[in-house]
Structure formats: structure tokens, C-alpha cells
Amino acid sequence: MENVNDDKLYEMFYAGSIRTIQINCVYINSNKSIVKSEKSLYLLKNENIITREEIVQIIKTRCSQNDVNHNVFSILKYNFVLDPRDVVNFLESKSFQSDIYLTPLKRLEDVLFDDTILFFHDMNEIIILFYETKPSLNKTKRVYITNPHKKTHKNVTKL
């Protein structure tokens, strides 16, 4: 009976599959300063996977902010993966390297998350950096030169 109570007590320190992640959108203006940051909880359709289509949909819905269009600068994945046996060592260590859990996405494809300790599920996130697009200053109209006579003409010589 004591083992059952111990298991319930330590259940939050076992690794489990991820069902929700944080989506963090950071908006950068043309002066290279952060204008706004939005965080929201996203429910995954498949455990441990956010598909390419889901990411594209998120980008499309969030690319416009205050009537200003933005393009994607970078997409980052933060997946806090720690073995349950290493939790004590992690908590006792004074140095924390968060960059080992942060990986940039080089291509827009399905993103896989590794199983994480239940206690740290809230830390897993996708970070999307948007930068402000400048309106096009190109006012020049393109001129296409086409030949109105599409057939070649023979030079007729009289003898």
C-alpha cells in the first residue's frame, strides 16, 4: 500500500508524452526592437508532434499585428528534456544551460518533441520571431516590349 502512495507522490516526476505546448510570438519592428510578445497555450492534435500545417496556420493567423504585416524571421523549439534520475542533480547544480534545450528550426517541417517530465511540461514551447515588413518603394511600372508582328516578312526582289 505504501508503494501506491509513493507512486502517486512521485508521478509528476515521471516522463510522459506532451499534449500541449506554449506558442510564443515575438514581434520586432524596423528599428530592431521588440514591440510585442504573445504567449498562448496550444493543444497538439497528435502527442509529441506539431505538424507543418499547424505551424503554417499559426503563422498565417499571427503575421498581422495592429495593421502591420510581419514576416517570419526565425522559428525556435524549446524542449526541456531531463531524465527523471537527474532531477536532483539538476536542482542542486548552480549553473543552468538553457541553450542545450533550444534548437532553431532550419526548415518548416513537422516538429517532434521528446517525452518530458510531467512537472516541466509547461516549459516546452515554439518561439516564432516576426519582423516588420517595409512597404515596397518600387513605383516603377514594368514595360514589356513585344513585337506586334509575329511573322517574319520576306523581302521580295523583282527581277
Image: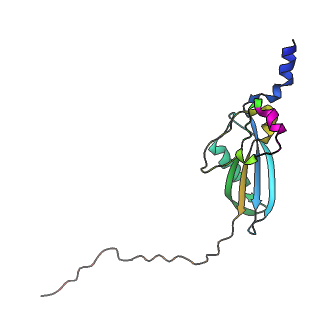
Magenta residue check for 89: yes
Question: Is residue 99 positioned above or below 85 on the image?
Answer: below
Question: Looking at the rendering, which quadrant does residue 28 occupy?
Answer: bottom right
Query: In this image, 70 relative to 109: left or right?
Result: right
Question: Between residues 47 and 119, which one lies in front from this camera angle?
Answer: 119
Question: Between residues 78 and 136, which one lies in front from this camera angle?
Answer: 78
* The furthest residue to the bottom: 159
Query: How many numbered circles are shown?
Result: 0
Question: Is residue 15 positioned above or below 42 on the image?
Answer: above
Q: Residue at x 69, y 50 (%)?
A: 76
Question: Looking at the rendering, which quadrant does residue 2 occupy?
Answer: top right
Q: Quadrant of the C terminus?
A: bottom left
Q: Residue at x 79, y 32 (%)?
A: 118
Query: Percent from the top left, x then y, of residue 125?
Result: 75, 44
Query: In this image, 109 relative to 90: left or right?
Result: left
Q: Residue at x 67, y 57 (%)?
A: 72
Q: Residue at x 80, y 62 (%)?
A: 35
Query: Percent from the top left, x then y, of residue 37?
Result: 80, 55
Coloring applied to the structure:
rainbow
Image: magenta residue range: 86-94
Query: Percent from the top left, x then y, of residue 65?
Result: 77, 59
Question: Between residues 37 and 145, which one lies in front from this camera angle?
Answer: 37
Question: Looking at the rendering, which quadrant does residue 52 occupy?
Answer: top right
Question: Between residues 77 and 54, which one lies in front from this camera angle?
Answer: 77
Q: Quadrant of the N terminus?
A: top right
User: Is most of the magenta stretch helix, strand or loop?
Assistant: helix
* The furthest residue to the top: 1
Query: Percent from the top left, x then y, of residue 102?
Result: 71, 47
Magenta residue check for 20: no
